Amino acid sequence: MPRNKQTARKSARIINTSDSDQRQSPQPQQRQQPPRKQVNPKKGVAAYRKDRVSQEIAKYQESRDLLLPRAPVLRLVREIMKEQSEIHGNLRIQRFALEAIRHAAEAFLVNMFEDVNMLAVHARRVTIMPKDIQLIKRLHMTMNDFKKR
């Protein structure tokens, strides 16, 4: 059961009309607000999420820019180059080569997730799971072995 936010309310004071109390100035009574209606939180949230997801999908389908940030890709490439530079000497990379790596990595990930999503749909699921990714890896390995023959 979800917890609801409860606001503190002042209770109305009862003023006695005895002689001793009439000498004191009575405080004005505050109007009590009617209690708020309980709104079913699940009703509005489900529609909001559905609409939000479809908007997000449309946004990413329309966009032409890359989703992989430049800095993490650069750090990964530098780390790999540092390991290789011990063997091959000092290595450098051009900016366009780094952009090509970003394009290739994003294309690989998008294609992999498309295949993983097809597996999840085939299993009558909406959520992709690690077992889908493992199966896709195995299928790609067997297809590559089959192509080599």
Image (cartoon, grey):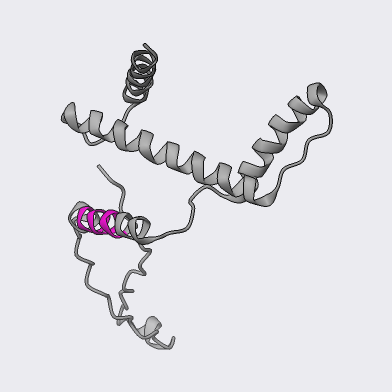
- Side of 23 relative to 12 (left or right): right
Residue occupying the far front of the picture: 149
Q: Residue at x 33, y 74 (%)?
A: 13
Q: Residue at x 20, y 60 (%)?
A: 39
Q: Position of residue 91 (x, y in %)?
A: 78, 35
Along the viewing direction, whichever of 28 and 71 lies nearer the viewer = 71
Is residue 25 part of the magenta span, yes or no? no
Residue 81 quadrant: top right
- Side of 26 relative to 67 (left or right): left
Q: Residue at x 29, y 80 (%)?
A: 31
Q: Position of residue 14 (x, y in %)?
A: 30, 74
What span is colored magenta in the figure? 46-55
Q: Residue at x 29, y 60 (%)?
A: 55
Along the viewing direction, whichever of 44 and 139 lies nearer the viewer = 139
> Is 117 located above or below residue 32 in the figure?
above
Q: Position of residue 79 (x, y in %)?
A: 71, 33
Is residue 47 part of the magenta span, yes or no? yes
Residue 116 quadrant: top left
Along the viewing direction, whichever of 93 and 42 lies nearer the viewer = 93
> Is 121 located above or below residue 132 in the figure?
below
